[in-house]
Image: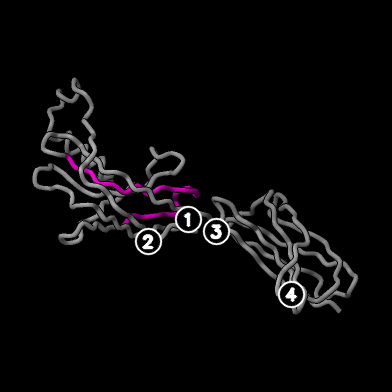
Amino acid sequence: MTSVRIRALAALLATVPAAGLLVGAAPAQAALNVTVKSASISKNAFVLSAKAGCTNVSATATLSAPLPTGDGVYSGVGIDLVVAANVDKSVADAELKRVGTTNTYKGAFQVCGKYAPGKYSALIYGAVLDKNENVEITNVVTKTLTIKRPSKVTLNAAPEPVKKGKKITAKGTLKVDGKVLAGAKVKIYFKKKGATSYSLKATTTTNSKGVFSKKFTATKTGTWKVVYAGSGTKVAAAATDAVKVN
């Protein structure tokens, strides 16, 4: 798919002789006397496997007035999904269609598992190729969204049941998008039976196989919990295991 900006420029190229483009200056890009007053997207946080397909995200833009069409060779409201840290790197785009005779434009773009995890910017704007062959662009409204990979952590507190004063081992494996994650910090908590909150007991790190293991002295019956906090590209995960202490 080609962005609205590129389509407007392509329409301009089609109206000008090739020789004129080669010797002339770049097409003018002026400010349009229409603004994007507000814009929204239906979802801004995604947890997707790299093998996942695509999901449609609805987008709505309200303009100060409809885009001119009578004298323009081309006009449209577009949305470009770009990498937040590199706005020149576009991964998806779409055109929003005007709703009846209103100033509202609606459409959808796709977010796919094949996109790298991280932060993205959805750039929403209007573009017009006017009768003087100028490409005019409105202001750009930016909406931020994130893509993270799914995480899963397991926990087995053993032996169970266990005698008071004996050692108990909290052990498990951390995986992100189905692959073990080495060198990740996890926190281990304990909540005694009847309590309403957990207490932090230790922080440990997964080994090369994504496995963590920590020994404790069994004192009371309760529930053990492991928490992986996640990151900007990985979703958080947690698991629990109840153990009876005799």
Which residue is farthest left?
70
Q: Position of residue 38 (x, y in %)?
A: 31, 54
Q: Which numbered tag is attached to residue 150? A: 3
Q: Secondary structure at mark 4?
A: strand
CA gap between label 1 and label 2 equals 23 Å
Q: Position of residue 220 (x, y in %)?
A: 83, 74
Q: Which comes before the other along the chain, label 1 or label 2?
A: 2
CA gap between label 3 and label 1 equals 11 Å
Q: Is residue 13 above or below residue 128?
A: above
Q: Main secondary structure of the magenta part?
A: strand
Q: Secondary structure at mark 2?
A: loop
CA gap between label 2 and label 4 equals 39 Å
> Hey, what amino acid is under mark 3?
Pro
Is the residue under label 1 in contact with that under label 3 (CB below 8 Å)?
no
Give the quarter of the figure containing the C terminus.
bottom right
How does the figure colour the protein chain or chains?
one colour
Residue at screen point 74% across, 74% down: 242
2 vs 4, front mark? 2
Q: Which numbered tag is attached to residue 51? A: 1
Q: Residues within 10 Å of mark 1 (few under 14, many from 20)?
A: few
> Hey, what amino acid is under mark 2?
Ser
Q: Which numbered tag is attached to residue 213? A: none
Q: Which residue is mark 2?
A: 42
Q: Which residues are magenta?
A: 108-129
Q: Position of residue 102 (x, y in %)?
A: 18, 60
Q: Secondary structure at mark 1?
A: loop
Apparent side of residue 121 relative to residue 28 in the rendered image (left or right): right
Which residue is farthest top?
23
> Hey, what amino acid is under mark 1?
Lys
1 vs 2, front mark? 2
3 vs 1, front mark? 3
